[in-house]
Amino acid sequence: MKVLQNIQTLFIGITCLASMSIVACHDHPLDSNNNCTEILVNPSFESITGTTPNPGHSGALTGVEGWVKGPGAPQQNSPDIYDSPQEIPKNFMGNRTPLDGNNYAGISQGRHYGNYLNESLMGTLQSQLPEGEERTYRVSAWFSTGSVRRYPSDIEILLYNSQTREELQVVDARVSNSQNWEELSGSVDANKAFDRLIIRGINKGENGHTLSYTYVDKVSVQECTSGCGDQNDDLR
C-alpha cells in the first residue's frame, strides 16, 4: 500500500513539473525546434494597411507594417511587395507561389548599363536588442530568383542600428534557384542595440551578370536560448 502511495506521489510530482513547463512556454514562447523566440515585426509581409503601389514603382512598400526601403539605395531603387490576386503567383518578374502566407517582397540587384544598382529591404525588430548583454540570434530568409531576370544574386542579411548606423553582417550567400524557395540563414552572438534588419544585394565583381531579381519571403530574426544552428540551403 505504501509503495502504491509513493508511486502516486511521484506521478503527481511529474505532472506538476510538466504543467510548470507548459506555463513557462506560454510566458516565453519558444520555437518548438530550436528554442528560439521570433522578434521581427511582420516576418512574411502579411500585415498591410491601405493600398500598395504596383510593383516596380517607387514607394512600393508603402503600407507594409514594419518594412521600408533600406538605407543607401537611390530613391528610384525601391523594393516591391506582391499582395494581390493580380500579382500572385504571376507578376512582371515571373511566376512564384508564396512560401508563407499570401504575400512576398522582391528586390533588384546587379549591373545595369555598366553601373551597379541594388535595392534593400529594412525590417523592424519588436524592440531594441539589449546593449552590453550578449545573446545569440538566428537570422534567416527564403529567396528565389525571378524567372524574367534569373541571374544569380549575391545577398547579405544584416542587423542594423537605425540611430548609429552600425551594421553586423549575419548572412553572405548567393541565390541562384529559380524553381524553388531557398533558405539562407546564420547565427550570431551580439551585444549591441540593433533595432532593424536589412536584406540587400552585394556588389561582387566576379559575377559579371546583368541586373537580377530576387523574391523574398518568410524573413526571421530569433533570439535563441539553445540549439541555434544554421539551416542553409533548405529548399521548398
Image (cartoon, rainbow, N blue to C red):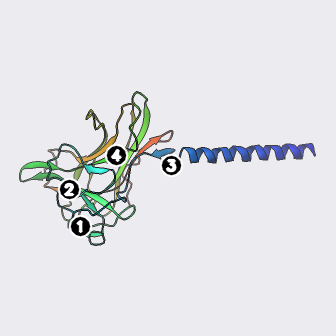
- The residue under label 4 is 124
How many other residues sit within 10 Å of disc 4, few (<14), some (14-19) or many (≥20)? many
Disc 4 + disc 1, Cβ < 8 Å: no
CA separation in Å, label 2 and label 1: 21 Å
- The residue under label 2 is 59
Residue 184's disc is none
Q: Secondary structure at mark 3?
A: loop
How many other residues sit within 10 Å of disc 1, few (<14), some (14-19) or many (≥20)? some
Residue 31's disc is 3
Q: Where is residue 47? Give x, y as percent.
A: 37, 58
- The residue under label 1 is 94
Q: Earlier in the sequence, mark 2 or mark 1?
A: 2
Q: Secondary structure at mark 1?
A: strand
Disc 4 + disc 2, Cβ < 8 Å: no
Residue at 82% x, 44% y: name it. Answer: 9
Disc 1 + disc 3, Cβ < 8 Å: no
Disc number lying in front (3 or 4) = 4
Residue at 21% x, 45% y: name it. Answer: 202
